[in-house]
Structures are given as C-alpha cells and as structure tokens.
Image (cartoon, helix red, strand yellow):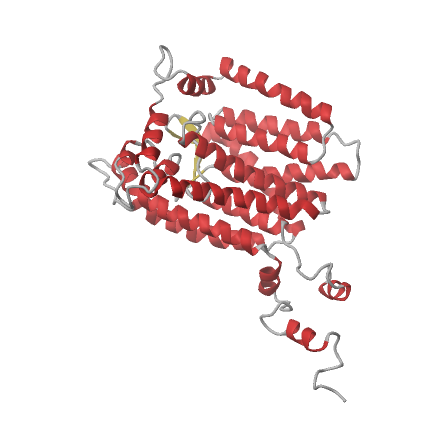
Amino acid sequence: MTDGRSSQTPGGGVWSRMKGRGGRGDRSALGMWFWDIDRVLLLLALLLIAIGLVAVGAASPSAAARYSDDKHHMPALYYLWWQLGWVGVSLPVLFLTSMLPVSAARRLALIGTVICLGMLIAVPFLGVTHNGARRWLNFGISQLQPSEFLKPCFIVTTAWLLSLRAQDNELPVVLITGALTAFVSMLLMLQPDFGQTVVFCSVWIALLMISGTPVRVMAALIGCVPVGLLAAYLFYDTARVRIDAFLFPGAEGGSDNFQTNAAYNAITNGGWRGTGPGGGTMKFRLPEGHTDYIFSVIGEEFGLVACAVIAILFLAIVVRVFVKLLDEQDEFRLYAAAGLATQFGAQALISMCVNTGLAPSKGMTLPFISYGGSSMVALSIGMGLLLAFTRRNPFVSRSPYIARWSGE
C-alpha cells in the first residue's frame, strides 16, 4: 500500500516541495540568495535608508536656503531629490554586492583597496576643496570622496592579511597592517580629515583584538593611543583647533564652538516628541544640517524618541552581526564581518556623539541617514560585503544529505 507520495526521491513530499519553484529548494541565483541572506540585517539596513530619506527631506529646506544665493536659487527639496537619486544607484549596488561569493567579494575588496589608495594619493594634488578641506575628486558629473570607498575595502583587506596568520604564524601581519593603517592615516591627515583617521585606526585596533593578537602587543598599542592624541594636539593644527573648541569654548585663542552649540540647541529644541515635520527653526542655524548634523535635525523635528530609535537600530545591526559570528569557523569571514560591523557602529557612534556635544566636531556623516552620494554608495558596498560574509545556507548542518546536494 502506498499513500500516493513518491518513493523514488529522497524525502518524498518534503523533498518535492523543497525543489518546488519559489521554495527553499529554489536553486536559482536569486532563490539561493534570498534563503542564504540575513534578511533581518537587510531589513534593518533598508529601514535606516528609509529613515534617512525622511531626515534629508526635513533638513533639505534649511540646507537649500543656506547654499542659495542671488545667482543660484535651490528648491526647498533640492537635496532630497538628489538623495533619492543616490539611493536609486546604491540599492542595486548593495544587492549585487551581497550576492557575491566570498572569494569574489574578497577579490573585489583587494582591487578596490589599490584603486582607492591611488585616488587618495591623488587628492592633495587634484582634489576639490570644500570648507577648508581637500577630500574630493571631481569627475565632472559628480565629486567622489575616496576615503569613503576605501573604508570597506581597507577592512576586508586587513581581515584577509590577519587571516593569513592561520597558515603561517610567523607572518608579520601586525606590522604589515599597521604600516598600511599608518599610510592611510597620513594621507587622511593631509586633507585634513581627523575623524576618518580615528575610524580607520579604531577599526584596525579592533581587528587586532578580534584576531587574537598577543596581549603584550595590544597593551603596547593601546598605551600609544594617549601618546598619539597628545602628539596630534601639539603638532596637528586641525586636531588642536577641534579639541580646544570642545574643551575650552570661547576661551582666548580657542574656537567659539559654534557648530556644537547649534547642534545641541537643535536636538533639544524638539523635546521628546519634536516640533513635527517642517516645524523646526533651529535647523536653519546649523552649518551642515543635511550631512554632519542631521541627527540634530531629527531630534528637533521628530523628537528625542526618534533619536533613541535610530540609536537602537544601529546597535541592533552591530549586535546582530556579532551574535551571528559566534559560531563562525572561517577566520577571514569572521574578521571581515566583525570589522565592517565595527566600522559601521563606530561611525554612527561618533556622529551621534558630535551631535549631542559628547565629542568634538569631526565632520562625520551618520551612516545611511546623512545626505551624500559617496557616503551612500560606499556604505551600500560595505553593507553588501557584510551581508555576503554573513550568508548562511539554512539547511547546512541540519541534514548531511542536503548539505552534499547543495554543494556546501
């Protein structure tokens, strides 16, 4: 007697349903991607992008008014329309990057590191200056900030170099990655871009800790941090001006701390619930309300509750990645994903601290929320790489037969 189910294929009806189109057994590239990807992580990233569009829409009128003049009048939603265009470019980049196999993603990052370093070297000679900083290269239709694109590539390259220690414990990976980080930092400080320098160095130290660098080496490096900050204060004008503005506002010979005060006034003006969309007034006093200080605009128009929700979303992304990596066996994937999550969280934390007056002004954008083409596309590459490195086949380890069938 039979119950009508096929006995010629392993698993009977279950196997048939798995092989059915659109099910978990869909072996098309899109089907495999959908079931392998961390959909919660992807949803959190898309949610931040959506919030960013609302935030840029709120900040656009004040930014357009600030940068309009008698010859060039910008529409109130000028920056929102541009941001919509950048999101339209960035989303395909994010999805396509997340579909890459690990080997292809690593190769892309290594090539990207070489290209971005070349562009970063060219910035002091060919770069475009804005607000006293030379950080962009002009490509005609748009301006590109090489340091933004270098961040995800640098992290993956550093992770790959550190993972080589598993093959040969004698390789001087700390010295090699340290030299690379020092070279990048020197180029960034020439722009000057002290905030990005802090991010690159912080991620490098975090990767060294994650990769199991000896305690004595880590202690020596961490001990060098205050020495480096002191040296930056004494010999690097940009750092000294920003630190003086933070610690001694209005002091003789110091800075007036205008940006930090304006950000603090804006973020506290809305209270817990905010003034409502378009109701903010303090945002018109912010120098870069659509980029560096967009968190303050959100606080004014949507309230401190909205700010707390955004902070929780950033924290959720970082925690999600690290929890997912607890059982990761591949050292390269572990280091790369942890480094990308650390960079994402560190950049968000620095930006929010600057907006709330807890850190000196650094010119740091809020990931996926601040306006900016280079930032949006580069962050999409970084998030795509993060999704690629955290992809897991949901059937592997559940059934040896299915694992062999899937080729994993």
The structure residue drawn at horizontal position 47% and vertical position 20%, both measured from the top left corner, is: 239
Give the farthest residue toward the front.
272
Residue 136 at x, y percent in the picture: 44, 34
Seen in the picture, residue 91 relative to 375 is either above or below; the reply is below
Which quadrant of the figure contains the C terminus? bottom right
The structure residue drawn at horizontal position 57% and vertical position 18%, both measured from the top left corner, is: 226
Picture quadrant of residue 290: top left
Residue 348 in view in this figure: yes
Picture quadrant of residue 118: top right
Give the farthest residue toward the top.
252
Between 12 and 81, the one nearer to me in the picture: 12
Q: In the rendered view, does 301 fall on the left or right side of 142?
A: left
Seen in the picture, residue 69 relative to 407 is either above or below; the reply is above
Q: For the image shown, how many numbered marks are present on the structure?
A: 0
Q: In the rendered view, does 308 fall on the left or right side of 320?
A: left
The structure residue drawn at horizontal position 52% and vertical position 42%, both measured from the top left corner, is: 315
Between 132 and 9, the one nearer to me in the picture: 9
Residue 335 at x, y percent in the picture: 66, 40
Residue 288 at x, y percent in the picture: 35, 34
The structure residue drawn at horizontal position 28% and vertical position 31%, both measured from the top left corner, is: 285
Which quadrant of the figure contains the N terminus? bottom right
Picture quadrant of residue 109: top right
Residue 77 at x, y percent in the picture: 29, 46
Give the farthest residue toward the bottom.
1
Q: In the rendered view, does 293 fall on the left or right side of 175?
A: left
Residue 107 in view in this figure: no
